[in-house]
Image: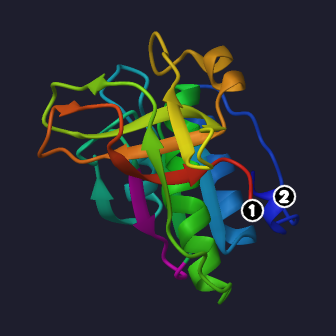
């Protein structure tokens, strides 16, 4: 997702849920990068050490937890040398949504990329979402006989159901103030791939 948008100077490091390893490696990455993107270790589990490690390393939290699903544990902070630090949830669907929603948007704004105009589609089927959270609903795109862009909801079993995303083109944003969205509702569309 980042490379196709031109952010090619990326390094990858797989770290275990080990406090000492996390301290050492995140410290190294903070010294080497202007932007650090982590995935996993930010929720409420016994091995979710990332927020504590970042605090020890002088990263100031700007926000932790967002009123949305998937991706509620999303974390963002600023490092001691003004590094932008994004700590995404570890579940694949959550991580992908948060990367597209927050990381890509922030990088495009910071690099003065011309903002894309908002894109809308129309729901092709009813969606009901009860929790009082913004819902980022994965969708597959199609067009109607009249040329209207339709967003067909893609069912995911959990935020770990990465295979279901292979049938999706992006996600639509469903407002937290509402719980039922009938077919035909205009919705804000976010594509996985750059247009």
Taking the image as drawn, is residue 5 in sight? yes
The picture places residue 5, in percent across and down from the top left corner, at 79, 65
Residue 182 at what x, y percent from top left? 27, 31
Quadrant of the frame with the C terminus: bottom right
Above/below status of 191 relative to 43: below
Q: Nearer the viewer, mark 1 or mark 2?
A: 1
Q: Which residue is mark 2?
A: 3
What is the quadrant of residue 30 in the picture?
bottom right
Q: Residues within 10 Å of mark 2 (few under 14, many from 20)?
A: few
Residue lying furthest right in this view?
8
| Residue identifier under label 1 | 195
Considering the numbered disc 2 on the image, is that residue within a helix, a strand or a loop? Answer: helix
The answer to which of 179 and 132 lies nearer the viewer is 179
**Residue numbers of the magenta segment:** 75-82
In the rendered image, the vertical position of residue 27 relative to residue 25, given as above or below: below
The outermost residue toward the bottom is: 112
Residue 39 visible here: no
Task: Name the element at disc 1.
Answer: loop
Residue drawn where x is 67% and y is 75% of the image: 34
Residue found 62% across the figure and 73% down from its top: 107
State which tag comes first along the sequence, 1 or 2.
2
**Vertical comparison of 30 with 23: above or below:** below
Q: Residue at x 61, y 54 (%)?
A: 37
Left/right of residue 90 with respect to residue 107 in the rendered view: left
Residue sitting farthest toward the top: 157
Q: Magenta span has 56?
A: no
Point out residue 194 in the picture as x, y percentages from the top left corner.
74, 60
């Amino acid at each position: 997702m980042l490379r196709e948008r031109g952010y090619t100077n990326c390094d990858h490091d797989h770290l275990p849920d080990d406090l000492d390893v996390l301290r050492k490696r995140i410290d190294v990455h903070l010294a080497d990068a202007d932007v650090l993107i982590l995935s996993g270790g930010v929720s409420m589990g016994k091995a979710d050490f990332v927020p504590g490690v970042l605090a020890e390393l002088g990263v100031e939290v700007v926000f932790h937890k967002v009123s949305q699903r998937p991706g509620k544990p999303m974390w963002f902070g600023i490092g001691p040398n003004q590094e932008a630090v994004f700590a995404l949830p570890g579940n694949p669907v959550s991580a992908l949504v948060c990367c597209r929603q927050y990381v890509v948007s922030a990088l495009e704004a910071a690099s003065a990329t011309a903002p894309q105009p908002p894109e809308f589609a129309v729901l092709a089927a009813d969606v009901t979402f009860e929790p009082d959270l913004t819902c980022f609903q994965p969708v597959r795109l199609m067009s109607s006989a009249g040329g209207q862009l339709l967003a067909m909801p893609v069912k995911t079993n959990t935020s770990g159901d990465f295979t279901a995303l292979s049938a999706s083109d992006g996600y639509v944003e469903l407002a937290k103030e509402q719980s039922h969205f009938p077919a035909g509702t205009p919705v804000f569309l976010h594509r996985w791939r750059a247009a």
